[in-house]
Each structure stands twice: as structure tokens, then as C-alpha cells.
Image (tube, grey):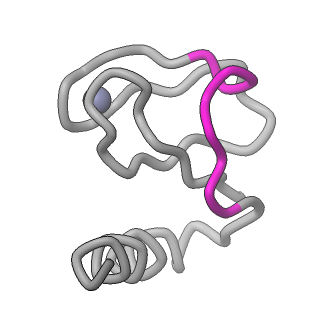
Amino acid sequence: MRYNIYLCRKCGAVCAGREGASSFKCHFCGKRNIAERAIPIVKGVESKDVQQTIAKIKLSKIKG
Ligand SMILES: [Zn+2]
């Protein structure tokens, strides 16, 4: 199973949504985002790599 990595439109948290799903729920604020209106940062991430990918994105955001 593959995931896309998105930014939540409400709170800006980095979220993973299943590839092909029409929406995903933010794990941080609980908002249901429409996938095609959200901002995909990375597409087609293997499920085993999702946590690592999110961690890398968070690190790069902190570094600016
Ligand atoms: Zn959110």
C-alpha cells in the first residue's frame, strides 16, 4: 500500500493519506481534508517509509 504525504489545510501538520483515497483525516487536528484540494508534498510513499518520510519533512521545515 502506498501513501501520499500532505499538509493539512487547517493546521499545516504533515499527514499521510492513502494513495487513491478521496480524503484523509489529519492525525493532529482531526480535520478531514479532500485529497485533491490538499497540497501533496511527496507522492507514492511505501507504507513502511511513511513515518521516516514525515520525520524528514519535519526536520527540513525546522531547519528552514
Ligand atoms: Zn490538521
Image-based side of 8 in relation to 22, left or right = left
Q: Quarter-wise, where is residue 3 in the image?
A: bottom right
Give me the residue at 50% from left, 19% from top.
33
In terms of depth relative to the viewer, which is nearer, 40 or 17?
40
> Number of numbered discs present?
0
In terms of depth relative to the viewer, which is nearer, 37 or 5?
37
Q: In what quadrant of the picture does the C terminus appear?
A: bottom left
Q: Is residue 54 above or below residue 24?
A: below
Image-based side of 26 in relation to 22, left or right = left
Q: Where's residue 32, x and y in %?
A: 43, 14
Residue 31 falls within the magenta-colored stretch: no
Q: Quarter-wise, where is residue 42 in the image?
A: bottom right
Q: Is residue 47 above or below residue 9?
A: below
Q: Where's residue 36, x and y in %?
A: 75, 24
Q: Is residue 51 above or below residue 34?
A: below
User: Image quadrant of ligand 1?
Assistant: top left
Residue 40 falls within the magenta-colored stretch: yes
Give me the residue at 25% from left, 21% from top.
30
Give me the residue at 66% from left, 26% from top.
35
Q: In what quadrant of the picture does the N terminus appear?
A: bottom right
Q: Where's residue 26, x and y in %?
A: 34, 31
Image-based side of 29 in relation to 53, left or right = left
Magenta segment boundaries in residue numbering: 34-42
Residue at the extreme front of the image, as rendered:
64
Give me the residue at 71% from left, 59% from top.
2
